[in-house]
């Protein structure tokens, strides 16, 4: 046996060409490319000679369910999300609300979200790496009442007994006590 020092230094061999002679008996390997996308999901048995192997094929992405309905209006609502897959025991589920990852469970609230349209993107990945995605848009109403026609005017100085008045409107027509 000879040890050859290899590398990129001045005392090392940069490239070494080696040729091997193999006996004919060493060429007995068998190879087969199996396209599992062509197989039905489930268990399959593969046999080659005396050897047998069992494989489980999973080409189907998980199914995502949520209680948030497309285009619905929510004021205060507990977000419920689940993902199921027939062949995987666990699925990884992520939720992104308006571009920000949120933890589950999550409460959708008009107190914390701005009024308007919001986008919820749910992604589920099963143990085989199959991915499904579901996007739902929903609305948060304008919840803040507005005060119009206040008297006296803001910043004014009043002498004597002032007469106070305000006209308040609520975009959701909630009952208000002023």
Image (cartoon, rainbow, N blue to C red):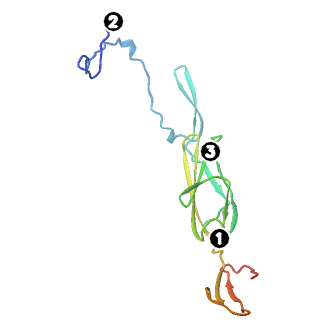
- Horizontally, residue 134 falls left or right of residue 143, namely left
Total numbered badges shown on the rendered structure: 3
Question: Farthest front residue?
Answer: 159
The answer for how far apart the CA atoms under marks 3 and 2 are is: 53 Å
Q: Which residue lies under the disc numbered 1?
A: 73
Q: Where's the N terminus, which quadrant?
A: top left
Front tag of 1 and 3: 1
- Whether the residues at callouts 1 and 3 have beta carbons within 8 Å, the answer is no
Residue 128 x %, y %: 56, 40
Which of the numbered marks, if any, corresponds to residue 1? 2
Q: Residue furthest left?
A: 10
Q: Quadrant of residue 133?
A: bottom right
Q: Residue 101: give x, y in percent of width and height.
A: 57, 54
Residue 35: which disc?
A: none
Q: Which residue is mark 3?
A: 91
Q: Residues within 10 Å of mark 2 (few under 14, many from 20)?
A: few
């Amino acid at each position: 046996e000879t040890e050859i020092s290899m590398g990129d230094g001045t005392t090392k061999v940069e490239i070494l060409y080696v040729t091997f002679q193999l006996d004919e008996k060493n060429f007995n390997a068998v190879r087969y490319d199996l396209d599992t996308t062509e197989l039905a999901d489930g268990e399959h048995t593969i046999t080659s000679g005396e050897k047998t192997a069992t494989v489980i094929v999973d080409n189907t992405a998980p199914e995502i369910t949520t209680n948030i309905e497309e285009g619905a209006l929510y004021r205060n609502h507990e977000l419920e999300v689940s993902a199921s897959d027939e062949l995987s025991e666990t699925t990884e589920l992520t939720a992104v609300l308006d571009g920000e990852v949120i933890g589950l469970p999550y409460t959708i609230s008009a107190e914390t979200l701005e009024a308007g349209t919001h986008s919820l993107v749910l992604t589920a990945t099963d143990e085989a790496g199959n991915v499904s995605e579901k996007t739902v848009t929903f609305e948060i109403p304008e919840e803040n009442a507005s005060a119009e026609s206040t008297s006296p005017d803001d910043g004014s100085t009043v002498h004597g007994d002032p007469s106070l008045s305000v006209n308040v409107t609520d975009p959701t027509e909630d009952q208000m006590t002023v």
